Amino acid sequence: MDNETKKKINERYERELNRGERFWPDSIYKDLIVSLGIFVVLILLATFIGVAPEPKADPADTSYLPRPEWYFLFLFKFLALYGQIPVIGKIEWLATVLVPGVGVGLLTLLPLLDKSPYRHYSRRIFALTAMGTLILDIVLLTVMASLPSAPNAEELAASTTLQAIGGLWIPAAILTILVAFYIFKRDIFHQSTRRSLPIYLTVIGGLAMVVMTVVVSARSSSYPKPEEAEVATTLVDQITAGQDLYSVQCVECHGDDGSVAIIEGVEGLEGEEITPINSTDVLYTITDSAMYEIIAYGRPNAGMPPSGKAYNAEGLTRSEIDHIITFMRYAWDDRFEAPPMKPLFPALAEGEVPSYDVHIAPIVKRYCISCHRPGKDNNDYLMTTYEEILTTGENKDKNVIARDPDGYLIQVIQGTPIMDPADPTQELIGVMPPKGHLKPDALEAFILWIMNGMPETAEDAAELFMSPTTATPAP
Amino acid sequence: MWKKVFDWLDERLGLNDLYTTLLDRPEPKGNWWNTLGSASLFLFVLQGATGIFLTVYYTPSPDHAYDSIQYIMEGVAFGWLIRGIHHWGASLMVIVVFIHMLRVFVTASYKYPRELTWLIGIGLLLTTIGMGFTGYLLPWNQRAYWATTVGTQIAGSVPFVGEFILKALRGGPDLSALTLQRFFSAHIWMIPAALVGLIGVHLFLIMKHGESHFPTKED
């Protein structure tokens, strides 16, 4: 840039200053308003949306799908789409190093590369169309990356192709043509009569990119949403989560109060002598981290199986094991004082009919699932979902019968064993749960549920509500 | 009385000179898009202030990081607010800095005599992203752990020196207590120190050359 141009630019700026304003107070009040606005927005976000809870890091859980912070999502998507390209898609560093490196390099050196002294947009068509395409692509790739993933291979292939067209090939084509124009036919950007061509090209290409993204989004709206795991954040929730896990994972051998010293009724471990885990000996001498190791990695010599993810993809996560330890401390360790706990299920009002979702599921989880889940000795009667409770097992026609007090399940939980019809001296099904019994309120809820036709959701149950005072509502 | 105090301070600090050089500067007619730079600075100060509060309870070790943040959220008075502002402020800062960069690009304010301001600005954009990357690991939750595993893996794909970069970032072949410790150190000392220095130069250059005017057909 010669001194003549520099002088012109400086004189031009002087003129702008003369018809301008003072920094204080003319400009700074705008800055203050914007900063204050940002501060208010942040307080609102922190108060009303907060920070989504996440489970603790678990290096053993390799099934976790990694997702970067949202402003890296476009790079993440770019890498995923790039990896689909044959041959060069396999050379990873082209996409991870070269492309971002060239991008950042061009951006950094921009003032040295762009020597033109002109600042008005009409004389910067190349810079603005190229940058506009890139920014649009960054936005659209971010949108694509935040969509749920396709449920099957066919849909995945179709979706990936559409994404690659919209997020990779169209922008690449626009940029190539723009650069080719710039190198071979630069006039096209300078002559005001013809400069509309690159603009039309960019706008039409941009619209095509947006359309592709809309199509991909529309297709993905029918995909199953990824399940959001609930994270226990308060102490009460953690203890409850721990007790639920204990009731499924540990209760068979250790008993519901941790007092078992000789294991009974467990295949392979019958008669094994163990230390009661609710004893002061155990609780005072084993620290939380040692307890974590025992639960995660097991005690092979004592028959305790490993429960962590390191040995078993279905195993407990880091957070889940922590919750079990929290539950053990607050339940049995006399140095810990438990906070007031929530009841297992909301108490029933008079005339209210319990539902599976609200009342029965927590009871089943606490008392039954430990044995009535796949891989246990349970006559194939599984109880992990509503469907399973009604339809599985060797005696599936007789287990749970709506409004029938002679169903098997309703009898055994009340302490009446079922005798084998072929040989009335033999027990077909013993009382349930085999050790201990349901708490009276849980038993009552269970009986009420079966006698009212086993409603699944709270809405179904509400329709069955029997008002104790007014018999019929006013017409 | 106030006059006396002011005069005494002015004699020693040169308050009137400061006023004329810092505040009473001539500027071209303002534009709302020009507030994004000061908004970035405001967010940086806010992140610094909330970050300092967070270090009071935060413990950078795999055993305690998660629980210490749990405690900030549940046990400390207004801890949820401080962490909430820090969490959302990080995202907002990236957005604001990025849009600020776009504004400078669109109005071509990076041209003579402000080339160096742009160069420093790119440094600020990259360090801001570095703050986001290092801060993301600190809660030591699943999302943080696995995002950093993949992020450092990508840094490790650089030809020839990738292995070294990967080990330098992680402090070993895998994510460990060392990784958390060095990300924490980078997040609260190294990168902020670089940021403060760059911001100083950036501001000096803005004062020196003045804010650029909005381009018209003449430019």
Image: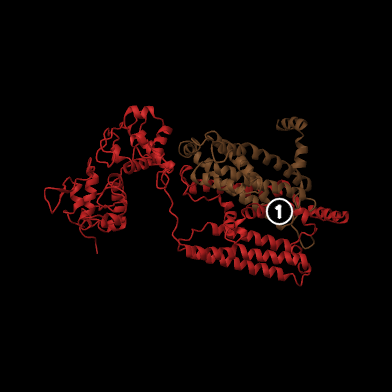
Chain colours: A red, B brown
Q: Amino acid at mark 1?
A: Leu
From the viewer's side, name the closer residue of B201 and A280.
A280
Looking at the image, which residue sits at the far bottom?
A193
Quick check: A344 left or right of B97? Answer: left
Residue pointed to by mark 1: A107
Mark 1 secondary-structure assignment: helix
Please identify the quarter of the rendering in which residue A328 is found: top left
- Along the line of sight, the residue nearer the viewer: A285 or B79: A285
Residue A443, above or below B62: below
Relative height, residue A200 to residue B91 (above, below): below
Q: Is residue A195 above or below residue A400?
A: below
Q: Residue furthest left?
A: A424
Q: Nearer the viewer, residue A1 or A391?
A: A391
Residue plotted at (21% across, 60% down):
A472
- Picture coordinates of residue A187 (x, y %)? 79, 68
Q: Using the rendered view, name the quadrant where residue A145 is placed.
A: bottom right
Mark yes or no: residue A338 visible: no
